[in-house]
Image: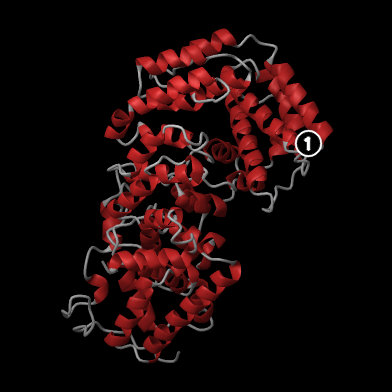
Amino acid sequence: MTNSNSISFPAYPFSHSGDSTPAWTQGTGIFDYVKENIDAEGFFTKEILPDKPAATGELDFQPMLGSFDPYLMSDLSADSTQQREIRAENFSRQIHTVLQAFLEDPTPVHAADFYMKAATLPCILYYDTVIETLSQEPIPACLKDLTQEWLYKAVNREAVKLAIVITGLCLLNEDNLTLCWQLKKDLLLLARCEEFTCFVVYALKLSHQLENSDLWDLMTHTRGWGRLGAIEACEFNLIKERKWLLHNAFLQTIDYPAMALMVFNKLNIMDLLDHEHLQEDTFQDLTTLILHYLIYLTEEPEGPKANIDLWELLEAYLHHAEEHHTDLVTASGLTNLREYLKQWTENQYWDYLTSNQLHLLIGKIETLLLSTDWLPQIKAHLLDKDGNANLDTIHMGFALGLDLHKELWAILKKDPLQTELYGFLLDPKHKRMAGMAAKFASAHADLYLEQEEPCLPLLDTLQYFPGTCGDLVEKALVSIYDSCRSLALQVLEAWPESTWPKDAQLALQKARTMTTSPLQKLQIDVLLKKRTMEYQDFLDVIRESKNK
């Protein structure tokens, strides 16, 4: 890498449309798109970007911003860790080949070749090897100029990601303080879009310019994968910062099982529990944290663990519960905690607590709960202040053995759109009520599918009741709403094939012609026994759809 001549940008021989402009300027620039769609509160307001993700080709398929990179880095995207690593090595070789060609001869042709690879290969799978290579000597001016051009003008997200991380390396040795300030400011602007947050955090850490205030700015202006990345990088030193994390860690738009583990690693929870008194809201936030951690331990038994003794944690927590257990919201959390501990006992899950410890903890919780007559309070709070089903309170009532079927059935008949109630009314232990609820649901199938939202809670519930409301599931498969179709597919995945509705195969075939989502096409092919959920089959579905 000896050629450090700065590249100029004359007429470009390569472009998508055959004209003389660079390929990376043909379309809506990512940077300007992000900048123009940040609202007055500082949030990026769009759910998609103007380009298409690299792995989806020309299909109209947009995963949640920031979600596809974690997927590609997980073993879910490959048959094995080894296969994922082999794929990453292959992408790394491809990008290094065009990068080296550009550095040796920084012509427009080589710049175009470099861009086309950067635009089509997932940056997450190779960027670290590029940084390792480039960090061995000063960044050539030609590469610095090119990647800054991409940062502001590129129309493909993967090229912008590569430009972000290389810019971070450039900032490490940049003497122009004004340029440094402007680049950092613009990187942080890009980071408001959660597709780029983690790359910006990495780039600023690489350049030693990342400050805790930058992370706080990102955490308070993102809600999903971007916030997660900022939390992971942040240090929570002040009491108000720790309180913020405890309260906001689970108020996100994504489901990340290890979030509780991250909070335990960031905060000294035992130190908090050593306080003589805890405020009600702090205790409720602790309840949420502990519940999520128990879920994580149950669902990720091979995952890393918090450096904490679970018995000591729960003992200290229940000591504080003696002060707060008469509050309905707090009691609802205690009920959920009891249910998880009972599951561990029933499943003989002794990895973290002995049988004796579990029974002692369950007994303490039940003593607290049974010291109050909850029936009047629960019946009075079956609906929240907005008239919607108060699910936490209802769940608490059922967990305490209270019979609320009559009250819930009356609510549903009065307002059929309270579809969250089916999760309680379809319980096969109450056959008569379950039968009535199933008939009621089928009779209102068309109403539920007129709009997107009403049918979703019902479909989610039906996963656990094989064969129930099969006619509604068939209709959902051919719904105009992708979300309804997606949940209907999950229902069939959860049900034994013997319980499928009689016309399920025909509905699946029709659903395949209706959907534009490669993932849904793959799910349907799996249900029809034509494919597996392997990453290669996913790519095959994309290519197949693209060629039609």
Q: To which quarter of the image does residue 545 belong?
A: bottom left
Residue 98: give x, y in percent of width and height: 39, 84
Residue at the spot 77% in from the left edge and 22% down from the top edge: 363
Q: How did the renderer colour the structure?
A: secondary structure
Up the image or down, 143 lies above or below 434; here it is below
Q: Front-most of 269 and 19? A: 19
Residue 18 seen by the camera: yes
Up the image or down, 161 lies above or below 384; here it is below
The residue under label 1 is 311
Q: To which quarter of the image does residue 543 belong?
A: bottom left
Residue at the spot 50% in from the left edge and 68% down from the top edge: 207
Residue at the spot 46% in from the left edge and 16% down from the top edge: 408
From the viewer's perspective, tell me whether residue 159 is left or right of residue 275: left
From the viewer's perspective, tell me whether residue 65 is left or right of residue 364: left
Q: Front-most of 452 and 178? A: 452
Classify the position of the N terminus by image quarter. Answer: bottom left
Kind of residue sitting beneath label 1 = Trp
Residue 174: give x, y in percent of width and height: 44, 73
Residue 214: give x, y in percent of width and height: 47, 53
- How many numbered tags mark residues here? 1
From the viewer's perspective, tell me whether residue 284 is left or right of residue 521: right
Crowding at mark 1 (Cα within 10 Å: few <14, some 14-19, many 20+): some
Instruction: Find the residue positioned furthest to the right.
Output: 356
Residue 28: give x, y in percent of width and height: 23, 63
Residue 191 seen by the camera: no
Q: To which quarter of the image does residue 490 belong?
A: top left
Classify the position of the C terminus by image quarter. Answer: bottom left
Q: Front-most of 423 and 197? A: 423
Q: Secondary structure at mark 1?
A: helix
Up the image or down, 2 lies above or below 111; here it is below
Q: Front-most of 116 and 276? A: 116
